[in-house]
Image: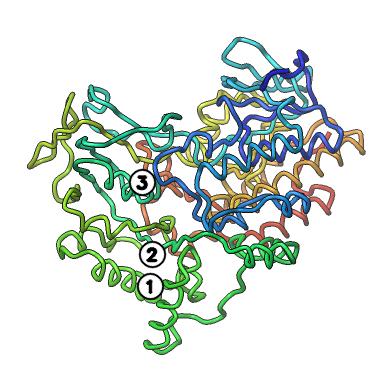
C-alpha cells in the first residue's frame, strides 16, 4: 500500500487533523488503546511545522535531546541527535523514522485538506469533510493542527503585485532556493528571519532587511554533540524527562531561586554573562523575577542591548536592532547563530521601518517613505496567525450550529486549552489556554495526548457517548488564564501571543503562563475527580 493509502473505511472512533508531533503521537496512543483512528494531513508527508518550514537555517530553539518524544524508552536509545539544536532536515528525518518505526503511515491520509467539521446531534458523531468532497465520520474529532501553522502575509498595499520571486518562511519550497547574485529583501525580524538572515546574506549579492520591531535574541552556541555527552544523557533519560515534566517550561533545569532585584549588580552581571555563555532560552532563567518585575527585566534587557552594541559595529544599526518598548521575553526570545554579526557585512542593509515605513510594494520594488529598493526576490518572514489561525481556517460547527470561529469572535475560549463548550467530543492539542508556545512543545503535546486518550478510555469504560465542558467551568478557566497573564510582563508587548500581529484579531493573551507542571496537576485533578467541570452523557 503506497504512502497515505489507508483503508477505504470512512467511519472511525477518532479523526485526527494534522500529522506533526501531536498527530503522530495521538495516532500511536489511540491505536494502542484500541480506537480506530484516521489522521488527515494536508502535506505530502509527516512533520507538520517541520514539513512546511524549510527556510535556510531553520532549526529548533529547544535542545534536541529534549525536543523529542519520551513515550518510548526504546526510541530514545536508538535515535541519536547530531547537534545541540537540531536542524529542520534532522527533525523531519526523526519524525519520518517515528512514523516508520511505529507503522503509522497506514492510518494517515496525506495530501488531504480538511474544509469543515460539523457535529451531528442525532448521530452523535462528527462529520469531517475534506477538499475532495469525501466526508468521514467519527465519535471524536481531535485537532492536531499546530500553534504556528497558518502563515500570514503583511498588510501592505500592493503585496500581491510583486512579480519577481516571493517566498514565505512558513511555506518554503521543498527544493533548494539559490539566492546567488540576487538582490534579496526580507520583511520581518522574528525568529524565522533571525535564523535565515545569516544564511541568505552569505549567498545574496545584497540583502535588505525591513524591520518594524526589533527582537531580543541570544546566541545558541550550537555545536555537534559529543558521543560521551549523548551516552550520559541516555544513561538516565528517564530522570531528565521527569525534570522536564515537573518544570516551568518543559526544560530539564531547576529554578535559580534568586530575584535579580535582590542581588548585587556585579553578581547580576556575572550571572547574565554565565547564561549568555551557556546560550539558548535558559537566559530567561537567570533570575526568578525577570518576567514579573519591570525593573529586574530592564537589567536583562539592557544586558542584551549591551551585547548588541558590542557586536554590531555601526552605532545607528545597533540602536535600531535594540528593543526598547517592551520587556525582554514578553515576545518569544529568539535564539540565533551569528545574527547580529551579519549586520557588519557590507552586503547587508537594515531599513528601520519605525523611521521610514513601507508605503507600498510594486512589481519589482519595496517603496518606503524615503527610498525605493529594487529587488530580485522578496521574502515574507511575517509569521503566523498563531494558536487559533489553523482552527479558524476550518469551519468547525458545534452542537448548536455555532462555529468555533464565531464563538471566538471576541477571543478564544477553551477549557484547559483542550475543549470548548458547545463542541462535544472535540479536543484541541495545545490549544489556546494551555502552556503550548510558552513551553517545550513536545512535553506539552505528550501531556495533552495522554490526557485525551485517558478521557476517551474513561468514557468507553463507563459507557459514555459525549463530553463537553460546562460553560461556567470554561469561563473560570479563561478568567484564570487572563489573571495569570496580567500578573506577568507578557501583556506589555504587542506580540503574536495575544494576536497583535493579525489585523482585526481580538487582543487576548492566549497561552497559560502558570507552567507545565502546575498545568499538568490541574488537568490530572480534573480527570481524577471524574471530570469535574465537564458534562458527560
**SS of the residue at dot 2?**
loop
Label 1 belongs to which residue?
A: 300
CA distance separating discs 3 and 2: 22 Å
- Residue 113 position by quadrant: top right
Label 2 belongs to which residue?
A: 328
Q: How is the image coloured?
A: rainbow
**SS of the residue at dot 3?**
helix
Which image quarter is the C terminus in?
top right
Q: Indicate which disc residue 196 carries.
A: 3
Nearest the viewer among 365 and 528 is 365
Nearest the viewer among 243 and 415 is 243
Q: Earlier in the sequence, mark 2 or mark 1?
A: 1
**SS of the residue at dot 1?**
helix
- Residue 456 position by quadrant: top right
Q: Give the percent coordinates (x, y) of residue 196.
A: 36, 46
Q: Earlier in the sequence, mark 3 or mark 2?
A: 3
Image depth: mark 1 or mark 3 in front: 3
Amino acid at each position: 500500500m503506497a504512502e497515505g493509502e489507508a483503508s477505504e473505511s470512512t467511519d472511525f472512533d477518532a479523526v485526527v487533523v494534522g500529522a506533526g508531533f501531536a498527530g503522530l503521537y495521538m495516532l500511536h496512543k489511540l491505536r494502542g488503546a484500541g480506537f480506530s483512528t484516521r489522521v488527515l494531513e494536508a502535506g505530502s508527508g509527516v512533520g507538520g511545522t517541520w514539513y512546511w518550514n524549510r527556510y535556510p537555517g531553520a532549526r529548533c530553539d529547544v535542545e534536541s535531546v529534549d525536543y523529542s518524544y519520551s513515550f518510548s524508552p526504546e526510541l530514545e536509545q536508538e535515535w541519536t541527535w547530531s547537534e545541540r539544536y537540531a536542524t529542520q532536515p534532522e527533525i523531519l528525518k526523526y519524525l519520518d523514522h517515528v512514523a516508520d518505526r511505529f507503522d503509522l503511515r497506514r492510518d494517515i491520509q496525506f495530501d488531504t485538506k480538511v474544509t469543515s467539521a460539523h457535529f451531528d446531534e442525532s448521530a452523535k458523531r462528527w462529520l469531517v469533510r475534506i477538499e475532495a468532497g469525501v466526508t468521514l465520520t467519527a465519535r471524536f474529532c481531535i485537532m492536531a493542527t499546530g500553534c504556528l501553522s497558518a502563515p500570514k502575509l503583511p498588510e501592505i498595499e500592493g503585496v500581491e503585485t510583486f512579480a519577481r520571486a516571493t517566498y514565505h518562511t512558513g511555506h518554503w519550497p521543498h527544493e533548494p532556493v539559490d539566492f546567488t547574485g540576487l538582490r534579496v529583501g526580507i520583511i520581518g525580524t522574528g525568529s524565522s528571519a533571525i535564523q535565515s538572515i545569516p544564511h541568505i546574506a552569505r549567498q545574496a549579492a545584497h540583502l535588505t532587511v525591513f524591520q518594524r520591531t526589533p527582537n531580543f535574541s541570544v546566541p545558541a552556541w550550537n555545536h555537534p554533540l559529543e558521543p560521551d555527552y549523548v551516552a550520559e544523557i541516555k544513561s538516565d533519560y528517564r530522570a531528565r524527562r521527569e525534570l522536564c515534566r515537573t518544570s516551568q517550561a518543559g526544560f530539564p533545569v531547576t529554578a535559580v531561586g534568586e530575584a535579580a532585584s535582590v542581588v548585587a549588580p556585579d553578581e547580576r552581571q556575572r550571572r547574565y554573562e554565565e547564561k549568555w555563555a551557556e546560550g539558548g532560552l535558559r537566559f530567561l532563567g537567570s533570575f526568578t523575577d525577570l518576567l514579573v518585575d519591570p525593573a529586574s527585566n530592564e537589567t536583562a534587557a539592557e544586558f542584551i542591548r549591551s551585547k548588541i552594541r558590542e557586536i554590531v559595529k555601526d552605532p545607528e544599526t545597533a540602536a535600531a536592532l535594540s528593543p526598547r518598548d517592551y520587556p525582554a521575553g514578553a515576545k518569544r526570545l529568539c535564539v540565533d547563530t551569528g545574527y547580529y554579526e551579519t549586520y557588519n557585512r557590507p552586503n547587508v542593509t537594515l531599513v528601520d521601518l519605525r523611521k521610514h515605513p513601507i508605503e507600498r510594494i510594486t512589481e519589482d520594488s519595496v517603496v518606503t517613505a524615503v527610498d525605493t529598493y529594487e529587488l530580485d526576490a522578496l521574502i515574507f518572514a511575517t509569521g503566523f496567525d498563531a494558536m487559533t489561525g489553523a482552527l479558524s481556517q476550518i469551519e468547525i460547527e458545534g452542537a448548536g450550529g455555532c462555529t468555533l470561529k464565531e464563538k471566538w469572535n471576541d477571543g478564544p475560549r477553551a477549557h484547559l486549552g483542550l475543549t470548548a463548550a458547545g463542541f462535544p467530543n472535540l479536543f484541541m492539542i495545545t490549544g489556546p489556554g494551555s502552556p503550548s508556545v510558552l513551553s517545550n512543545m513536545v512535553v506539552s503535546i505528550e501531556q495533552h495526548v495522554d490526557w485525551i486518550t485517558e478521557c476517551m478510555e474513561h468514557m468507553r469504560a463507563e459507557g459514555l457517548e459525549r463530553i463537553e465542558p460546562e460553560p461556567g467551568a470554561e469561563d473560570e478557566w479563561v478568567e484564570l488564564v487572563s489573571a495569570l497573564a496580567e500578573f506577568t510582563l507578557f501583556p506589555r508587548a504587542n506580540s503574536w501571543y495575544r494576536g497583535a500581529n493579525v489585523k482585526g484579531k481580538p487582543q487576548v493573551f492566549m497561552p497559560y503562563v502558570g507552567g507545565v507542571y502546575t498545568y499538568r496537576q490541574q488537568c490530572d485533578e480534573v480527570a481524577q475527580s471524574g471530570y469535574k467541570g465537564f458534562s458527560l452523557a
